[in-house]
Image (cartoon, helix red, strand yellow):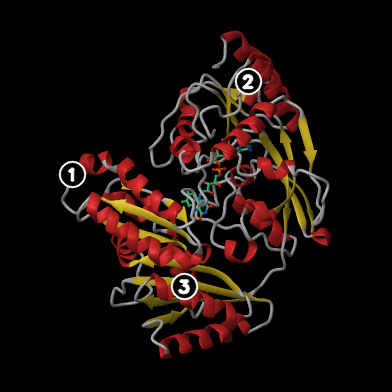
Amino acid sequence: MNAQPSTLERLKALVGENGWSDDPDRLHPKLVEWRERWVGETPLLLLPRTTEEVSKIVRLCAETGTAIVPQGGNTGLVGGQIPHGEVLLSTERLNRIRETAPEDDVMVVEAGVTLLRAQTAAAAAGRFFPLSLAAEGTATIGGNISTNAGGTAVLRYGTMRDLVLGLEAVLPSGDVFHGLKRLRKDNTGYDLKQLLIGAEGTLGVVTAAALKLFPVLNDRAVATVALKGPADAIALLHRAKAESGGAVEAFELMNALGVSFAETHMGLRPPLGGAPPWIALIELASGEAGLAERAMERLLAAALEEDLIQDAALAQNQTQAEAMWAVREGQSGAQKPEGSAWKHDISVPVSAVAEFIARASREVERIAPGARVVAFGHVGDGNIHYDVLRASGSDEAAHSALRDKGAKAVHDIAVGLGGSISAEHGLGAMKSKEALGYKSAVEIASLRAIRAALDPKRIMNPNVMF
Ligand SMILES: Cc1cc2nc3c(=O)[nH]c(=O)nc-3n(C[C@H](O)[C@H](O)[C@H](O)COP(=O)(O)OP(=O)(O)OC[C@H]3O[C@@H](n4cnc5c(N)ncnc54)[C@H](O)[C@@H]3O)c2cc1C
């Protein structure tokens, strides 16, 4: 239920003068998703500064049946952070680094801290926080947790589920879950924090987290290689793992079209000449000086010898490494001038990546002849961003009209191969309904029972999930 006028006044009083806004100019950037795919509305933006304020807000909303959408950096890719008449609760001012504790390899940060600030705070404490993604300057830790973000280093460090040791959250009743433990082992029953991770704001508001830190690995080697196809990329990935003794930090795949868009629309020079059909970016990292580079050189030499790769460039310095990464990180943004794409964020078992791409491409060609596929992503995690642009010169609206049909075909193939329709972006407004078609009745009933038990009035992000 959307807020009554009297409830709005009571909510404003809870947070004080600087803690709310209904000024359209202030609200605008929080109501529009960055690609403008979702544009929302809200009667009130709330900007609590403390967990206690969040608790009071949620308690009042629970009493009055007022719906809330939590929002961090508004970088989410499935629209779950955009309100449609609900009160908008921003974590913008919940932005303190509460503690860095290198002796426990832990830091405790509030939900509104950006990922970049968290990484910087870890570095200042002589440690490494490995979550990394292109939106890290704006995306917040609360948003990363709520979408169970993955990013480029999942291969070695896991997703946010693996990186959170403890959580503090306000549950839909307004009660505070004080779960900021920093234990590596805690086998005391159901794990409430894991339910909140990936809950996309439906089970409460995350207010702070205890995050796992790692040693800084300064010895790094970054290379880009030319490949004939995704199957060779998987063979190379296994080679790289073995050759480096598990030091593969990232293994990313891109196809020629995506690389060409990064050059045309972002001015990013391709790392390799000759427009190879596929390229992979590999990063190795170790704590022992020279080890990563030696392992990379051995890997590339053997792979060239065996014709597993056709060309390779090893970054000679940080600037070159960053230039290689810029091409990878530009893959999504560089498509924008080409018009809207059917976007898919799928995962399959690593061994099925090549089959997925081949089958999906055949099916897309059948549905939309000539459509252009930009496939890229975290191939080391079996996660491919499979984006389909209209055929050159064809009608934008006609292509968009086929989006759902295309998504169904692509998702059916991924799920048929034992995969998922959302590898890392979540369900949000985009995929919540569709996901119902891919989950069993048993699973849906169980998940709904959990949600109803915690949030009987369904006030938390009501349009998202099941
Ligand atoms: C350019 C770009 C590249 C990306 N690359 C990757 C990638 O490589 N890997 C990957 O996994 N993801 C990637 N993402 C998605 C990214 O993980 C999410 O955008 C990000 O984690 C969301 O953080 P946010 O603070 O912006 O959250 P928002 O967008 O504000 O919110 C996202 C969801 O979380 C909920 N939420 C936010 N904060 C809280 C909170 N404190 N408590 C409860 N619920 C909350 C919202 O209601 C919403 O449902 C990328 C996004 C962009 C824009």
**Image position, residue 43 (x, y; %):** 52, 19
Task: Bin the neighbour count of mark 2 within 10 Å (Cα to Cα): few under 14, some 14-19, many 20 and up.
Answer: many
Kind of element beneath mark 2: loop
244 in relation to 444, above or below: below
Give the Cα separation between the discs numbered 2 and 3. Answer: 47 Å
Report the amino acid beneath label 1.
Answer: Asp
Please name the residue that numbered disc 3 is placed on: 234
* Residue at mark 1 to residue at mark 2: CA–CA distance: 44 Å
Residue 385 falls in image quadrant: bottom left
Asked whether, in this view, residue 378 is left or right of residue 92, the answer is left
Q: CA distance from mark 3 to mark 1?
A: 36 Å
Kindly identify the amino acid type of the residue bearing the numbered disc 3: Ile
Name the quadrant of the C terminus. Answer: top right
375 displayed left or right of 320:
left
Q: Which mark is residue 313?
A: none
Residue 274 position (above or below residue 328) = below
Residue located beneath label 1 in the image = 395
Q: Is residue 102 left or right of residue 201?
A: right
**Furthest residue toward bottom:** 305
Can residue 312 be seen here? The reply is: yes
- Identify whether 42 is placed above or below 304: above
Q: Which one is in front, 28 or 298? A: 298
The mark nearer the N terminus, 3 or 1, is 3
Is residue 91 visible in the rendered image? The answer is no
Residue 158 appears at what percent x and percent y?
63, 59
Quadrant placement of the N terminus = top right
Location of ligand 1 given as a quarter of the image:
top right
| Residue occupying the far top of the picture | 6
Q: Residues within 10 Å of mark 3 (few under 14, many from 20)?
A: many
- Residue position marked by numbered label 2 in the rendering: 457
